Amino acid sequence: MINHLTALDRSGHSATLRVRFSTVQVDLTSLPSVVALSKHLVHTFPRLDAVIFNAGMGAFTGIDWIGCFISLAKNWIEAVTHPVFKIQALGRVASQPVGGDVGEVFCANVFGHYYLGHELMPLLRKGRGRIIWVSSLEAYARVFDKNDIEGRKATHSYESSKRLTDIIALTSSLPSAKPWADSYFRSGEKEEKKGGGKPKMYLSHPGICATAMVDLHVVLFYCMTMAFYIARWSGSPWHTISTETGANAPVHLALARDEELADSQAEKKKWGSGSDRMGKGVLRVTDVEDEGGEAWEELGRDAWRQMEELRIMWKAKLEQL
């Protein structure tokens, strides 16, 4: 939250006159916690202009140090932009008080946000209606299996969840996903009769920030940070390092005028927080692997169908509590 506030202050959008701040805690791996948050927000606020789905986790258990040093020796910038040496646990799940369990990383990074977004549709329809996903540069196509959408069998569950994030956000307005996207964006007859437009999804990522997502000893953390600085000074466009600079892209999508987003076709792009060599924040559009074409539309349709089926199934289970 602090990171987004700092980026907000630097955004130049007269943000302090337009934004209200409130703090509430939620456990995104617990669907009852998500439901409790949604009820609190619906009863507390008259509208929401934007939600930024930023929280996330990885099932990281360690680092392959030999692989790390080999990668750095071959290509320093590539090694600290697209690391291949992080070790991740397989098959972690988040147990729910009713109805079984959900893939843990999937629930924290995608499904918890997704479920919350639908529950907040009445507020989003009354506001500017922006859902802003925070993805990653590590959203690789090769790690995602549409037949294992929760990433229970994935050796790279974090990257799989971020690939799913890209797919959901960028296909939300495609005809192939329309039946399920329309179901998701529907808030109920009473709310829709009162007016308000259909919310839109936008996609962003924070570049490469120095965070504690991978649990490192303090000395190793500072070594990692120094490695990031070396990459930036060597010409990397993505090493924002500070989380405040990393928040630039989602904050821009939250505060920009509707006309500005429409002119730039922002809904169809992945917006990244980048940096120049001196650390000044730069917004950059980021390529998404295999985007476009019939296969991409089919992937979006399958992802949206499964996400909506999961949401509806879990909603029925949670209503039993």
Image (cartoon, rainbow, N blue to C red):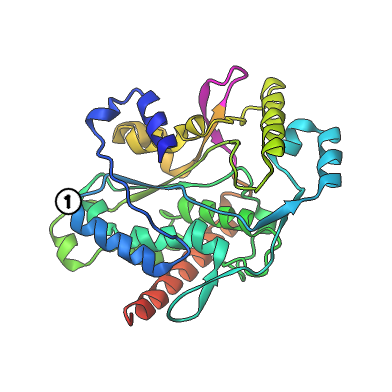
User: Does residue 308 show up magenta in the picture?
Assistant: no
**For the view shown, which residue lies furthest in the top direction?**
278
**Up/down of 197 relative to 223, above or below:** below
Q: Whole-percent x and y of residue 12?
A: 34, 22
Decide which of 61, 264 is in the foreground and name it.
61
Q: Whole-percent x and y of residue 301?
A: 49, 64
For the C terminus, give its image quadrant.
bottom left
Instruction: Please say whether residue 98 is visible from this viewpoint.
Output: yes
Residue 44 shown left or right of residue 13 in the figure: left
**Up/down of 191 relative to 237, above or below:** below
Q: How crowded is mark 1: few (under 14 residues within 10 Å), some or many (20 or more)?
A: few
Q: Which residue is drawn at 30% across and 36% down?
A: 258
Tally the marks. Answer: 1
**Up/down of 148 relative to 108, above or below:** below
Residue 265 shown left or right of residue 88 in the figure: left
Decide which of 180, 220 is in the foreground and name it.
220
**Residue that label 1 marks:** 46
Q: Which amino acid does label 1 sit on?
A: Pro
Residue 222 shown left or right of residue 6 in the figure: right
For the N terminus, give its image quadrant.
top left
Q: In which quarter of the image is residue 4?
A: top left
Q: Whole-percent x and y of residue 300?
A: 51, 60
Q: Give the range drawn in magenta.
A: 275-287
**For the view shown, which residue lies furthest in the front direction?**
218
User: Does residue 283 show up magenta in the picture?
Assistant: yes
